[in-house]
Amino acid sequence: MPHEIKGRAAGLICVAIARPDISAAIQAAHQARPLADVIEIRLDSLTEPAIAPFIQAIATPLLFTNRPRWEGGQCGEPEEKRLDLLRQAVQEGAAYVDIELNSDQAAVQRLCEAARQKGGTKVIISWHNFSETPGAAVLDDIFSRQLSSGAHIGKIVTMAHDFTDVLRVLQLQEQAHSQGFPLIAFCMGRAGMISRLATLELGGFMTYAASNAGEATAPGQLAALELINCLKSFNHAD
């Protein structure tokens, strides 16, 4: 398990599974188990999304995401139907659910309240920009909105075009630390690849990896084994 790598930072490794078929997704999740602290099930990739089969079949902590098209995902269902699956995941005892910051605010509050009442599920409030990295003022505002959302964990992921984009996003970890708010923050794209590793060393709550090189769910996402080998190399340098 990656958390057993000597000297590794405390942040988690989440392996994202995006398959159209439930059986294939479960099989991929089982294959990813030795590499993952958390397994993300992309409900928006499934032709017939469901929660219970994954809860019943997989012992690794599960994160359920049902990403809408308006934030880079594949789900085109009405919002109520899309978010109902996340509420089901809370009731079924998922470890994490991911809801977008730009979702209806009443829906965000209802999901956070359901998680608090049920107990055991942590809500990740996420924001993605697949084209660019905004300036510091915009990123600060997004962080502040996440902090006040009622969610347990924030997630801010942008497209990096150069190292300055990466530095702006990673610097958010300083604010998160001072506020005691767990934050997932890194960048997509080639320029952002280093941030997927660095975020763990800077106090980031979690980073994401693909089950294999051909199944990345975002630009610049490393395969889980590659990510772990990089972490091992860092630790061998001590």
Image (cartoon, rainbow, N blue to C red):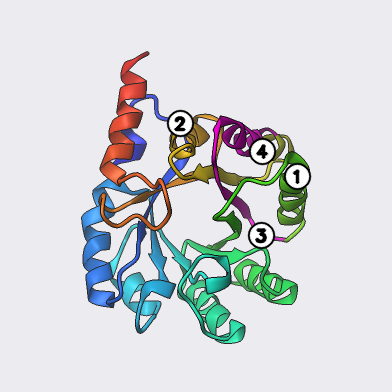
Mark 2, Cα crowd under 10 Å, few <14 / some 14-19 / many 20+, is some
Q: Which residues are magenta?
A: 150-174
Circle 2: residue type: Ala
Position above or below: 25 against 75: above
Position above or below: 122 against 185: below
Q: Circle 4 sits on which residue?
A: 172
Of badges 2 and 4, the one in the foreground is: 4
Circle 3: residue type: Ala
Does residue 90 appear to the left or right of 237 in the view shown?
Answer: right
Q: Distance of mark 1 from mark 3, alpha carbons?
A: 17 Å
Circle 1: residue type: Asp
Residue, far top = 238
| Element type where label 3 sits in the image | loop
Mark with earlier residue (3, 2): 2
Label 4 with label 1: CB-CB less than 8 Å? no
Residue drawn at x 77%, y 50% as measured from the top left: 141
- Comparing 213 with 203, the one in front is 213
Mark with earlier residue (1, 2): 2
Does residue 123 appear to the left or right of 39 in the view shown?
Answer: right
| Element type where label 2 sits in the image | loop
Position above or below: 206 against 82: above
Mark number, residue 151:
3
Q: Circle 2 sits on which residue?
A: 9
